[in-house]
Image (cartoon, rainbow, N blue to C red):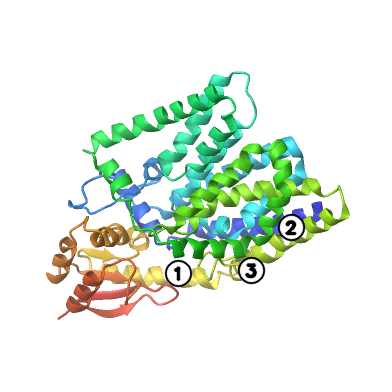
């Protein structure tokens, strides 16, 4: 069993490190959400307020609490850096994984500890999301630190409660939907009502004071954007689709977690509760623009429970065989093959073939070379058109020195449909041909622009080329 786990951890660890190095060193973007987060961080670095009226330029919407964006802004220099922001996410993931692994090693031994690391880092969701310029990894880190601080009883209960509440509050100040850990710890401490009550009060204090202060300084825009503008439509079929995709990629992990539930109830009760409360967060993946990142907390919690299943290795032959089959199935089959319903959250097998093997062979991976060439062609196009820019995917243009007129068009598209933003502010610009260059990734039926905006683009601009390669950007310039 130990040899199996060490082999899997070596393979998945190698994939994680090589993929991470390529992501941190490359300026190209993968996930649409990276552009808005990086642009917000860079504008904060330049002294712009994070929360401002949606009707005033520069047009930016921030539907997240501020901590990750604030920290990422400190890493920006004269030019925006996607790599530095990604490194922040990677470091947060490593801290969450290492802290959990250390706690499991101390209480259950090396086998449980290493099994957790292999299961957590080897899954396609963690492998990919660890290196995005997105807020989730940092929020996950703070949640995990709060869970670990809550598990044992300290000699000074008040100090423990304050520490736990601070960690949980920092998680919520990073992303407001990270509520699974606070609820899990509240349930853990509920048999001691005073402790549970003090936890709630401290969390409200540590979270509420910064948010109230920021809301006052932004003339109420923070609460507007966090609550009013975040009330986007909910699609049950979207949530069930994501749930099916995740289940297909983690079926063996779930089976192991069931076997580890009994040991967890005895020795890691907080993570068993965290698994249950994380299921509630998964329901949020049905909200418009939500994605598989809503499964990050569940992935970590299941990995802990699944690792505890190896403690049932010895008792009887049936359990022994079940644990071995499920563990091998997750580590060497699902983690290497499942791509979460064909998304770009690619599994370890694809990463090994297309990234790790070329790097070990001394070659530049073809996909990386493709992205480098795209960036070079885009840079040439941006130099030919130095005027105002409108970009659907905005991180790469931003890294090349050009800021999109509209930060996060998908949010403005949704708010326009709900009547919360006047899209004439955009369509008038298009009809007056104010933009020197428009970059589209979706030429038809874009999920990030309204149909009215797309019609205005087609009526007033003409396509003149593209960057080529995977996920190409198409160039649109003013019609003659």
Query: Residue drawn 30% across and 32% down?
Result: 212
Q: Quadrant of the C terminus?
A: bottom left
Q: Which residue corresponds to mark 1? A: 371
- Disc on the earlier residue, 3 or 1: 3
How dense is the environment of label 2, judged by Cα within 10 Å: few (below 14), some, or many (20 and up)? many
- Disc on the earlier residue, 2 or 1: 2
Query: Residue drawn 51% across and 56% down?
Result: 129
User: Can residue 421 be spotted in the picture?
Assistant: yes
User: Can residue 114 be spotted in the picture?
Assistant: no
Viewer-nearest of discs 3 and 1: 3
Relative depth, front residue between 258 and 412: 258
Q: Which mark is residue 327?
A: 2
Viewer-nearest of discs 2 and 1: 2
- x and y, in percent, of residue 196 in the image: 52, 27
Relative depth, front residue between 19 and 314: 314
- x and y, in percent, of residue 275 in the image: 59, 46
Q: Secondary structure at mark 3?
A: helix
Side (left or right) of 62 relative to 4: left
The number of numbered discs placed on residues in the rendered structure image is 3
- Disc on the earlier residue, 2 or 3: 2
What is the C-alpha distance between the residues marked 2 and 3? 15 Å
Query: Residue drawn 54% across and 59% down?
Result: 128
Q: Is residue 450 above or below residue 216?
A: below
Q: Secondary structure at mark 2?
A: helix
Viewer-nearest of discs 2 and 3: 2
Residue sticking out furthest to the top = 156
What is the C-alpha distance between the residues marked 2 and 1? 36 Å
- x and y, in percent, of residue 100 in the image: 63, 41
Q: Which mark is residue 337?
A: 3
């Amino acid at each position: 069993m130990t040899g199996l786990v060490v082999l899997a951890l070596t393979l998945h660890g190698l994939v994680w490190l090589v993929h991470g190095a390529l992501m941190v060193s490359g300026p190209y973007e993968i996930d649409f959400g990276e552009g808005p987060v990086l642009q917000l961080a860079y504008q904060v670095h330049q002294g712009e307020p994070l929360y401002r009226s949606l009707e005033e330029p520069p047009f930016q919407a921030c539907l997240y609490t501020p901590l990750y964006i604030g920290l990422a802004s400190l890493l920006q220099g004269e030019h925006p850096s996607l790599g530095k922001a990604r490194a922040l996410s990677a470091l947060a993931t490593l801290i969450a994984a290492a802290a959990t692994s250390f706690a499991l090693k101390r209480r259950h031994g090396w086998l449980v500890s290493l099994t957790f690391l292999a299961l957590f880092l080897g899954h396609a969701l963690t492998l990919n999301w660890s290196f995005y310029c997105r807020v989730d990894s940092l929020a996950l880190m703070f949640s995990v630190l709060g869970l670990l601080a809550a598990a044992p009883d300290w000699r000074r209960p008040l100090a423990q409660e304050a520490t736990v509440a601070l960690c949980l509050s920092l998680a919520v100040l990073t992303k407001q939907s990270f509520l699974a850990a606070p609820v899990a710890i509240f349930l853990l401490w509920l048999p001691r009502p005073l402790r549970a009550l003090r936890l709630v009060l401290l969390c409200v204090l540590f979270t509420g004071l910064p948010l109230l202060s920021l809301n006052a300084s932004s003339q109420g825009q923070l609460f507007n954007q966090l609550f009013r503008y975040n009330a986007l439509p909910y699609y049950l079929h979207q949530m069930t689709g994501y749930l099916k995709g995740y289940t297909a990629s983690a079926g063996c992990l779930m089976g192991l977690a069931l076997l580890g539930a009994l040991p967890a109830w005895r020795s890691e009760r907080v993570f068993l509760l965290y698994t249950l409360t994380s299921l509630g967060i998964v329901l949020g993946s049905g909200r418009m623009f939500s994605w598989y990142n809503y499964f990050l907390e569940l992935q970590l919690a299941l990995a802990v429970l699944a690792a505890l299943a190896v403690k049932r290795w010895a008792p009887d032959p049936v359990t022994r065989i079940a644990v071995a089959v499920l563990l091998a199935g997750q580590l060497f089959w699902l983690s290497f093959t499942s791509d979460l319903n064909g998304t770009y959250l690619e599994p370890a097998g694809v990463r090994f073939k297309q990234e790790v093997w070329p790097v070990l062979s001394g070659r530049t991976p073809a996909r990386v070379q493709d992205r480098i060439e795209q960036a070079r062609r885009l840079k040439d196009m941006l130099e030919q058109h130095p005027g105002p820019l409108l970009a659907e995917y905005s991180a790469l243009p931003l890294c090349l020195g050009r800021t999109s007129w509209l930060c996060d068009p998908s949010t403005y598209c949704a708010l326009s449909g709900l009547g919360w933003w006047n899209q004439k502010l955009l369509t008038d610009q298009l009809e007056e041909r104010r933009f020197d260059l428009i970059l589209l990734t979706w030429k038809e039926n874009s999920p990030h622009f309204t149909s009215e905006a797309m019609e205005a683009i087609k009526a007033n601009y003409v396509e003149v080329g593209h960057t080529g390669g995977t996920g190409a950007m198409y160039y649109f310039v003013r019609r003659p």
